[in-house]
Image: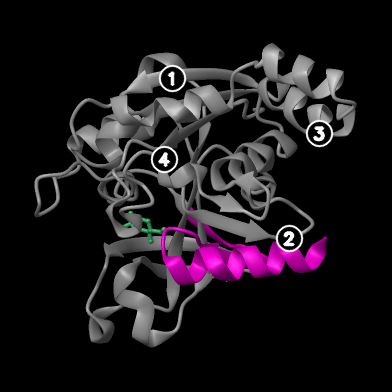
Amino acid sequence: MKIKKAVLPVAGMGTRFMPATKVVPKELLPIVDKPVIQYLVEEAVLSGIEEIIFVISKNKELIRHHFSHYPELESVLKARNKEHIAEKIRPIHEMAHFHYIYQDEPLGDGHAILQAESLVGDEPFLVLFGDDIVKHDIPASKQLIDQFKGESVIAVERVPKESISAYGVIHPGENQGRLYEVHGLVEKPAQEEAPSDLGVIGKYVCPPTIFEAIREGAASKDGELRLIDGFIKLAEKEGVWAYHIEGERFDTGQAKGLIEANRAFHDDL
Ligand code: G1P
């Protein structure tokens, strides 16, 4: 089944980048000349996605502005013989159909995804977290979608021991090349308790059964509903798979990752 819809939960406050993110959402911080979130939307569109569902909060309206048509700006640029710059702006709102729904309370990424349930309906969909950018000729989302056969596929990468407790970590079973059976998942384990070095990065292909599984998944310690708890629940009933993504991954939710992404994409110009 073709995967046409992507849910991007982007309601978080971005406290790590304050004061830069006092007004500007962290997803709009730039990698060279494009906001981080545009890289993710382009990745999704290049992977066959036609509808983007942003889960935002009231202080994230600038994301909506970024993906809206801005004819006044295009006219001014044209009048000033800057058609080549207008060309960079025009396609942004045409890339996909954009929907915006609100997560009014910070109750976790699982709760954010539940807000998209009626827009997604009864079909598989892609979830992209706002921070994880992968640089590779084959878009990371396409790599995942290509593995989808009806059951969940979660993106993972190999993570050094000292960083593993910042990730969801899979307990892998059999593998065929880069595709692993998932026997279990642990969110942010202590280093010595990590079931492998395969850490989850924020890209997932979900069957619609994930919604019920998120509801069933126990709210994690801090009272938030997490997507990973949904996968833990789902793995009890049906297959869950992990795919070791090819490419260089940047965690743009950290200053270091954002700077490294800027360097890597700038070197490409
Ligand atoms: C989330 C997930 C975690 C995953 C990580 C990847 O954590 O809960 O499983 O490894 O994204 O970016 P967060 O970074 O939001 O704390």
* Earlier sequence position, callout 4 versus callout 3: 4
Tell me the quadrant of ligand 1: bottom left
Above or below, comparing residue 102 to residue 153 in the picture: above
Q: Nearer the viewer, mark 2 or mark 1?
A: 1
Q: Rounded to the nearest whole Å, what is the CA distance between mark 3 and mark 2?
A: 26 Å
Is 53 placed left or right of 248 in the picture? left
Badge 1 is on which residue? 100
Q: Nearer the viewer, residue 78 or 169?
A: 78
The residue at 78%/33% (across/down) is: 88
Residue 166 on image: x %, y % = 32, 70
Amino acid type assigned to the residue bearing label 1 in the image: Tyr
Residue 216 on image: x %, y % = 19, 36
* Earlier sequence position, callout 3 versus callout 2: 3
Amino acid type assigned to the residue bearing label 2 in the image: His
Q: Secondary structure at mark 2?
A: loop
Residue 245 counted in the magenta span? yes
Q: Rounded to the nearest whole Å, what is the CA distance between mark 1 and mark 3?
A: 27 Å
Report if the beta carbon of the residue with label 1 is closer than 8 angstroms to ligand 1.
Answer: no
* Earlier sequence position, callout 1 versus callout 3: 3
Q: Rounded to the nearest whole Å, what is the CA distance between mark 4 and mark 3?
A: 22 Å
Badge 2 is on which residue? 136
Quarter holding the C terminus is bottom right
Badge 4 is on which residue? 24
Q: Nearer the viewer, mark 1 or mark 3?
A: 3
Amino acid type assigned to the residue bearing label 3 in the image: Ile
Q: Give the magenta-colored segment's residue range.
A: 241-269
Residue 140 on image: x %, y % = 65, 53
Q: Nearer the viewer, mark 3 or mark 2?
A: 3
